[in-house]
Image (spheres, rainbow, N blue to C red):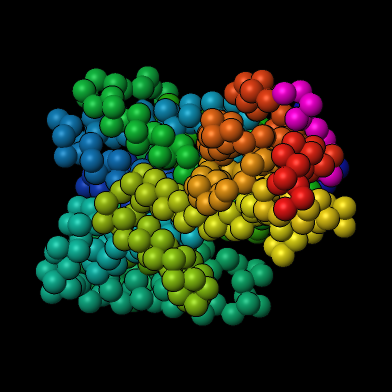
Amino acid sequence: MLNRINATNIRGDVFGGLTAAVIALPMALAFGIAVGNALGAPEVGAAAGLWGAVIIGLVASLFGGTPTLISEPTGPMTVVFTSVVISFASTAESPEKALAMAFTVGVLAGIFQILFGLFRLGRYITMMPYTVISGFMSGIGIILVLLQLAPFLGQDPKGGVIGTLSQLPALIQGTRPMELLLAVITLAILWFTPSSLKKFCPPQLLALLVGTLLAVTAFQGAGLRTIPEFSAEFPTPSLPDFSGGQIRMMVVNAAVLGMLGCIDALLTSVVADSLTRTEHDSNKELIGQGLANVASGLFGALPGAGATMGTVVNIQAGGRTALSGVVRAMVLMLVVLLASPFASRIPLAVLAGIALKVGIDIIDWEFLKRAHHLSLKAAVITYGVILLTVLVDLITAVGIGVFVANVLTIDRMSALQSRRVKTISTTDDDVELSSEEQSLLDQAAGRVLLFQLAGPMIFGVAKAISREHNAIGNCQAVVFDLSEVSHLGVTAAIALENAVKEAIEVGRQVFMVGATGSTENRLRKLKLLDRLPAENITADRLQAISLAVGSLPSAARNA
């Protein structure tokens, strides 16, 4: 059955879908206009945003793996897609060509998501340090805010982030007071709508209605810029356009957009699980999201992902199955077809205020306020990813952030694990030994060395193995104890092999204890165990120490 759709909760699903549709309308318009402004064609963006909300919501609800998830164009996806549009607009021969190439990127992003799902990579997508997730989400929020500054101040967009920042003084100087006032009123409604009123009317819809009403009454003669008229007809599908000679850039942008969509959707799915006490199917969800973005791109609509706000509202209103997402898409489609003539009265300043508020909400304020208290390294990674996201690009930010975070984590884990690499020659060492083992080591008087490893031996521990081995003094027998090794990585295994080979070369007796399971398989593949006599390989540490002491010359044992 498609995404577990059933009729057991019709009333709740209908209410959930209706409420989600009400929220989706202003958001889809705001995101669509943000993309359209990048091309200087807001009417194209408005239609693309609205149909994106319909198509993505419908397809993802039918084929996804999270029944209550509401999918639509989101802030993060819009930011990345806008940057794609801007990059193509500077090279394509026409705005139509740039938009066609951008929609092709959306199709490719969907294909990437389908492949992620088919290869069952869902559970790995969100295995990313929180410092990096917080950094790039906050960076995306800042980008969305910056891109809305020009329309918020009543002016046409000045390019991307760098263009906006470089022309900020001119933007401020050219502010149109009435548009700025209307945008500020929009923000005030979004921020200060009482909770009692939010139950009946979402703040986004209230801001859209109040802002539009003010524009046609109190601000009627102010010359406010509004959404240009656009066609509300069903979009017609078109083939992907690869003729721009920028296939490499398109594939890279598609990979970034697809990965971001996966992260956005799966994080929202986790939120839905916590609210409904259910468990989503990550891989199926990725396939559903991919199909939705492929369909949306083919029909010339914006890409999208799971939307946290719409999902939470859907669940709170009673939605429990994917039927709620289908209802939302149908309701939204009727609104687009029947009410689009009235959209030309909506002021661009109102939509800029709505989008700017979304950008502010995306920024992870709670973590940013605490990051420097939690860890200086965490703060550096988070703020570094923010700067790279805003000033360079998302893929560079995430790549560098993940690399640095993982290196620091590996360094910390290696330091902790290195403490579990010990060489023991007497009972004075800090290690737990039985009385018989202690007695035997004392009898050997330093001539037998117990080389003990424990826990996961990742590649960062190889240095500790080499260091401890190099510190070996004048002993005549070495017992390598692997009884407590849960994982032996290739690099650590090579370091262990070098230690054994060197011990044999200088004439020491070598004994191996406790190599079982995957550890034993790793050593046999290295042919390390073949270097030792069969009687020197045992599962019992006491037996190995006894054999080592017995291998000493009698003078050494009695010393």
**Residue shown at 24%/27% (left/top)?**
246
- Apparent side of residue 99 relative to residue 360 in the rendered image (left or right): left
Image quarter in which the N terminus is found: top right
* Residue 244 appears in the figure: yes
Identify whether 352 is placed above or below 526. below
Question: In the image shown, does 237 or 170 lie closer to the viewer?
Answer: 170
Label count reads 0
- Apparent side of residue 258 relative to residue 311 in the rendered image (left or right): left
Q: Position of residue 437 (x, y in %)?
A: 83, 52
Question: In the image shown, does 420 or 226 lie closer to the viewer?
Answer: 420
Question: In the image shown, does 196 or 140 lie closer to the viewer?
Answer: 140
- Name the quadrant containing residue 161: bottom left
**Residue shown at 83%/55% (left/top)?**
439
- Farthest-out residue, front: 555
| Residue 537 painted magenta | yes
**Residue shown at 87%/57% (left/top)?**
435
- Name the quadrant containing residue 208: bottom left
- Apparent side of residue 320 relative to residue 398 in the rendered image (left or right): right
> Which residues are the magenta region?
533-542
Q: Position of residue 299 (x, y in %)?
A: 43, 29
- Name the quadrant containing residue 499: top right
Q: Position of residue 19 (x, y in %)?
A: 64, 56
* Residue 280 appears in the figure: no
| Residue 493 painted magenta | no
Q: Position of residue 248 (x, y in %)?
A: 28, 27
**Residue shown at 67%/40% (left/top)?**
477
